[in-house]
Image (tube, helix red, strand yellow):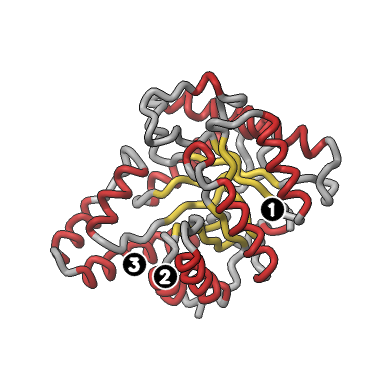
Amino acid sequence: MHIRDIIKPHEPTFSFEFFPPKSSEAADTLFETIKQLSSRHPSFVSVTYGAGGSTRELTHDLVVRIKETTSTPPIPHLTCVDHTAEEITTTLERYASVGIGNILALRGDPPSDNGNYNRSNDAFPYAADLVRHIRQFNESGKHPDPRGFGIGVAAFPEGHPGTPNRLLEMDHLKAKVDEGADFICTQLFFDNHDFFDFRDRCRLAGISLPIIAGIMPITSAKGIKRMAELAAGAHFPAKLLRALKRAGDNQEAVQRVGIHHAAEQCAGLLNADVDGIHLYTLNQSRATQEVYASLGMG
């Protein structure tokens, strides 16, 4: 299903993100999670893509399995890093052949084991170049949907760590939009004010695409540090930090604080007419289930 058929005016989407498992046991565990969350009837689910395409086949296999065994549209991530144009085209052809309707096009992170990685060797140095290539693939008529792939792009409400100049950052986002993006999905954030300001700046820049808000419930003290690494410069509101400090080393209490904060964020976003909410699940279901329940969604 094309993203233009999924995102509808005044009907916010709800979606989840998963990462591909690295073993058959982990795959079975993940599919139990997916089965549990499928009862929430998500609008779509996304599947991540490792740095440098390190999980290329795992991502493909998981996307196809979701497509064949559930009624939820999967949206695979696709990155520029360490890929030739031919490799990207082959990946698009494989997804088109099994009826995958959408792609989340990202610049991507360089391989973690190569601190001197040279992005100039990539066929597509920036996400806007990848979006252009996907659009050209769509125009070739190789996809069963005459519209081709729906194309999503990433954005950073708190600012991209590699682009301190926020005006230039918006120019980069606008370039991706102008190349043919259909929707925007944001990096995680913990303060809705950052999202609302970002959304307003998008509209001022002439970006009218649907903007889906990325939310990641905190589920452990260790996870907080990991989130800070994944989203460099992430703003943790003092209110959230005080609650986490009260929870101390009590793992259950930390998780309750994280779920409560995420639920409050989601409620505030819905009240402000957000286009959609994308929950980063970390391949677990409890936090997502409880956030849903707190919103009166069963």
Quarter of the image for residue 35 reads bottom right
Q: Nearer the viewer, residue 52 or 199?
A: 52
Quickly name the residue at label 1.
3
Q: Is residue 221 left or right of residue 174?
A: left
Q: Position of residue 148 (x, y in %)?
A: 78, 45
Check disc 2 and give the amino acid type. Val
Quarter of the image for residue 283 reads bottom left
Whichever of callouts 3 and 1 sits on the residue coming sooner in the sequence is 1
Whichever of callouts 1 and 2 sits on the residue coming sooner in the sequence is 1
Q: Is residue 69 above or below residue 94?
A: below
Check disc 1 and give the amino acid type. Ile
Q: Is residue 180 left or right of residue 229?
A: right
Q: Residues within 10 Å of mark 1 (few under 14, many from 20)?
A: many
Q: Nearer the viewer, residue 19 or 1?
A: 19
Q: Is residue 91 above or below residue 69?
A: above
Q: Is residue 103 left or right of residue 117?
A: right
Distance (Cα) linking label 3 and label 2 = 6 Å
The reply to whether discs 3 and 2 touch (Cβ–Cβ < 8 Å) is yes
Q: Position of residue 196 (x, y in %)?
A: 45, 46
Disc number for residue 259: 3
Residue at 50% in and 80% down: 298
**Numbered-mark total:** 3
Disc number for residue 283: none
Q: Position of residue 182 (x, y in %)?
A: 67, 43
Quickly name the residue at label 2.
291
Distance (Cα) linking label 3 and label 1 = 28 Å
- What secondary structure is found at the residue carrying circle 1? helix
Check disc 3 and give the amino acid type. Ile
Q: Position of residue 172 (x, y in %)?
A: 54, 27
